[in-house]
Each structure stands twice: as C-alpha cells, then as structure tokens.
C-alpha cells in the first residue's frame, strides 16, 4: 500500500527517536530526543508525534537502569502525554499505549508524585485480549511491548502470563513470516514470562531476529530491551 | 477533534489518524524466509530445533 508523505515523515521520525533509545539502552546514557530542540516548530511537533508513537519506551532506559531522565526529555514526554489524549472510542491499543505513558510519567516525573490514582488512573479494558486467537494476541502484545516492563503489573501483562505458550507460538510464527517487529516485541514479552518452553530457544531466536531485522531501530529497541531484562533476570 | 490536534496537523501535516494508525497497525502479510536464512539460523542455533522445523505451508496461488 502506498503511504502518504506525512506517514513516511512520521515513520522516519519514530525511527530517529527509537535510535536514540537504542543508543541509551546500549550505552546506559540519557535518552535524547532528536528534533525536539524547538518544540514550537514543525520539527518539534513532529518529534512529539514520534514520541507519542514510540510511547513509554522513550524512557525505557531510565526505567530499566533506574536513572532519572534528562529534564528536557521528561518535558517532551510530559507534553506528549498531554497533547495526545486518546479519543473515547479509540482502539484498545491506543488507549493502553497512552496509559503506559502515564504510568511511566508517574514513575519518573517528580512533579507527578502524589498525583491522584483511582478512576483517574484506571486501566483500560483488556477483555479483547482474553478472547483473541493466539495470532491476534501476539500481534497485539507486540504492538503493546512498551507494557512489557519488569516489576510492573497490568491487565495486559496478566493476560500474557496466562497465555505464555500462545505467545511462544506467536513468536515462532512471526519469525517464520519474517515479521521482525512482531517477533521482537513478542520476544521481549517472553523474556518477562515464566514457563516459556525450553525448546523455543528464545535467546537464540531473539539474536536471529536482531540479526535479520535489527536495521530497523524499533526491532533493535525490542531486542536490546529483552537483553537488558534478561541480564537483570526479571520476571513480571 | 480537539483544536490542538488541528493546530498540530496544520504545522506538521501529520494527522491524528496517522498517529492512531501507527499505534494500532494491521498485521503485515507474511514473507517466508529462504534457505540462506535457514542456514544462518542453523549456525546460530546449535541446540534449538523448533525454529528450524519445516516452514508453514505457503498459501496456494491462483
């Protein structure tokens, strides 16, 4: 399908931001957001859109390494959360992506400390995943990979825990279909799940996915996130 | 659509619907790997057999 110029522009910006995150995951440095130096200009606005698409993963290095983000990065992240609230009838993936960003903001933004929980921070509905086939489940989990964070619980993570074998099947299917983004996202989830079949060869599979699809920074981000999580030995 | 969305679209040309599509993409069609890639995986994987099992049948053409 032919893409619009705006879509291509957005995808390029998302890849730039994902590259920044991969660099931080590899080097343990602060995340910098390419193009966000002038938030009021077109480049800055595009950077905000790219951050919205990348979602909570923008600050993943700071969550995994327990380091505070740079103030300017946190500002961009906060402005993105505020600028792109999901519509009431938005798809579950859009709702959950925004919820994941708010969760990360509560965790890392000192100004959010003591912000109200309860209904204001209620989780979106996750029942659509309970009824999903294992193929759809894996696709949706890969899209929602920013929720795959050690030590953080949510309804999506609970579904993933209940359906580990389905996610493993989906991982294999994604590799066979050469769908590297989906394989990388599913692999990141599996790194956090208990009861993954040994025969899957998850670590080797993820190395293969990174070898084949790692030129896409979004694939590299998931693979590197899985590597960091695995090194920490964490389960959700 | 909130007015901030409209202003954003005017500046960047990126519409809210583009962002939502990126956040909730449809699954792309599968592309099946070739024998060179199988060989690469075999070199990487000494102990694992699952990913090397016979490929899923391709859809019949026509």
Image (cartoon, coloured by chain):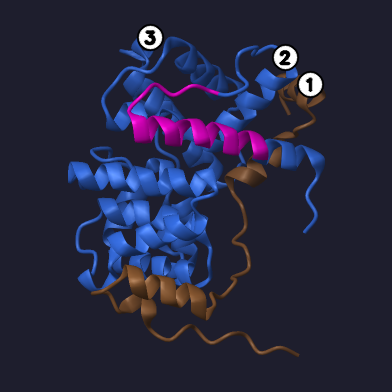
Q: Position of residue A197 (x, y in %)?
A: 23, 70
Mark 1: few/some/many CA within 10 Å (<14, 14-19, 20+) = some
Left or right, A22 with respect to B10, comes to: left
Mark 1 residue element: helix
Q: Identify the residue at image location x=58%, y=44%.
A: B23
Q: Position of residue A49 (x, y in %)?
A: 63, 29
Q: Identify the residue at image location x=40%, y=29%.
A: A24
**Residue A41 marker:** 2
- In which chain is the residue bearing label 2? A
Q: Are marks 1 and 3 on the same chain?
A: no
- In which chain is the residue bearing label 3? A
Mark 2 residue element: loop
Question: In which image quadrant can residue A231 be found?
Answer: top left
Task: Report which residue position mark 1 lands on.
Answer: B11
Range drawn in magenta: A12-33
Is residue A20 positioned above or below A157 on the image?
above
Residue A38 visible at all: yes
Mark 3 residue element: helix
Left or right, A77 with respect to A63, comes to: right
Q: What's the CA distance linking mark 1 and mark 3?
A: 29 Å
Tell me the colour chain B is drawn in. Answer: brown
**Residue A111 marker:** 3
Q: Which chain is blue?
A: A
**Nearer the camera: disc 2 or disc 3:** 2
Say if mark 2 contacts mark 1, CB within 8 Å.
yes
Mark 2: few/some/many CA within 10 Å (<14, 14-19, 20+) = some
Is residue A232 positioned above or below A158 on the image?
above
Query: Is residue A14 rendered magenta in the image?
Result: yes
């Amino acid at each position: 399908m032919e893409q619009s110029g705006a879509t291509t522009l957005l995808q390029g910006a998302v890849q730039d931001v994902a590259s920044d995150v991969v660099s931080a995951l590899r080097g343990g440095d602060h995340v910098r957001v390419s193009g966000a130096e002038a938030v009021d200009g077109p480049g800055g606005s595009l950077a905000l859109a790219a951050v919205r698409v990348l979602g909570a993963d923008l600050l993943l290095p700071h969550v995994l390494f327990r380091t505070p983000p740079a103030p300017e990065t946190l500002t961009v992240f906060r402005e993105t959360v505020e600028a792109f609230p999901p519509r009431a009838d938005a798809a579950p993936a859009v709702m959950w992506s925004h919820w994941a960003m708010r969760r990360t903001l509560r965790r890392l933004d000192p100004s959010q400390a003591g912000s109200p929980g309860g209904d204001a921070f209620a989780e979106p509905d996750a029942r659509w995943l309970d009824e999903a086939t294992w193929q759809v489940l894996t696709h949706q989990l890969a899209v929602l990979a920013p929720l795959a964070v050690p030590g953080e619980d949510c309804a999506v993570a609970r579904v993933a825990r209940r359906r580990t074998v389905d996610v493993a099947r989906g991982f294999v299917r994604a590799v066979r279909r050469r769908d590297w983004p989906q394989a990388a996202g599913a692999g990141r989830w599996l790194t956090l799940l208990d009861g993954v079949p040994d025969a899957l060869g998850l670590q080797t599979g993820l190395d293969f996915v990174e070898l084949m699809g790692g030129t896409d920074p979004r694939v590299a981000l998931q693979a590197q996130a899985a590597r960091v999580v695995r090194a920490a030995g964490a389960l959700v | 659509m909130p007015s901030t969305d409209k202003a954003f679209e005017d500046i960047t040309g990126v519409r809210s619907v583009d962002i939502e599509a990126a956040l909730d993409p449809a699954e792309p069609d599968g592309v099946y790997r070739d024998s060179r890639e199988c060989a690469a995986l075999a070199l990487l994987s000494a102990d694992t057999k699952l990913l090397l099992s016979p490929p899923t049948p391709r859809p019949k053409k026509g």
